[in-house]
Amino acid sequence: MTDSEFCVVCGATGRPLVDGVCSECAANRAVLVSAPQRVVVTICPTCGARPVGVRWEGSGSSTVLTATDLTPHVKVHAEAGLRRVDWEEKSYTPTVREYEGQARVGFRGAERTVRIPMSVRIEHRTCPDCSHKSGKYFTATLQLRGPAEGPFEKSPVLRDRLETQWNRLLNEARPDWKRAVSWLEPLPEGFDCFFTDTLAARAMARLAKQRFGASLKESATLFGRKDGHDVYRVTFCLRFPRPPKPTAPVVEQ
């Protein structure tokens, strides 16, 4: 570019030009970022999961809208780069919220801030996992029991011990295994834990066997038929050994 070249819009010289227009004027004339007039965000009101394609993800997330819900709806000019968007809630009703985003956008070597108004309608829809749990749906049962042989343990003592081991097991379990837990039912002989996913129940049972030396027995019961195939409910019986008795300290003579 020579000194005689100037922006055909503002007349400025000494600036890089594209098709005779400087980046400042090009940015003023172009729509660098935009958003639909109204977007819909679907949230499970129980666990906070959001649908992603045919799956639901993010169980345990907040039911409050965040940038993760809003920013993906922003459309960016082909020559622009979106650096970040800071969102502020302006007003709300029980189902519709008005937001304003301040977007930092890079365009032809310079950055500028662009305002983005967005109206969001929140659609509350219960995810399949929460729907199954609320309806007491299950495909597998994990039975937590004490040893089959040996001295009898009173129910409160046994349940306290099994509950402690179960909580330790949950701390080591994968998030998708824990999401498959529907409910825990106390019994005189221990606990029955009901799962909405048989593979998750089997994985938890094997983890308990590995971590605590529990014995594992698996059995299946015909529950019904679906799409011409037999449907089974699987039971995993875990028997946790008693903790070793503390040894008496050796007293030196």
Image (cartoon, grey):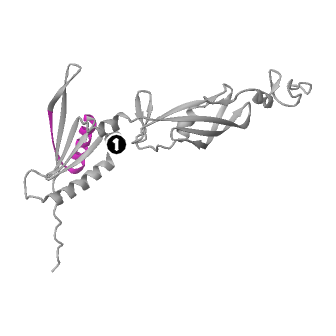
* Location of residue 29 by image quarter: top right
Where is residue 153? Give x, y as percent. 12, 59
Q: Is residue 87 magenta?
A: no
Q: Which residues are magenta?
A: 198-220
Q: How many marks?
A: 1
Crowd tier of the residue under label 1, counting other residues whose Cα lies within 10 Å: few below 14, some 14–19, many 20 or above: few
Outermost residue toward the top?
228
**Res 154 quadrant in image:** bottom left
Dominant SS in magenta: helix
Residue 208 in percent (x, y) is at: 23, 46
Q: Quadrant of the N terminus?
A: top right
Q: Residue at x 55, y 31 (%)?
A: 39
- Give the left or right position of residue 252, taking residue 179 as reference: left
Q: In this picture, is 21 found above or below 106? A: above
Q: Amino acid at mark 1?
A: Arg
Spot occupied by residue 198 in the image (x, y as percentages of width and height): 25, 35
Residue at 24% x, 20% y is 227
Circle 1 residue: 174
Q: Position of residue 86 (x, y in %)?
A: 62, 42
Q: Is 250 drawn above or below residue 101 in the view shown?
A: below
Please identify the residue farthest to the front as the structure is shown.
Answer: 93
Secondary structure, mark 1, is loop
Name the residue at the bottom extreme: 253
Give the position of the C terminus as an image quadrant: bottom left
Residue located at (27% from left, 35% from top): 197
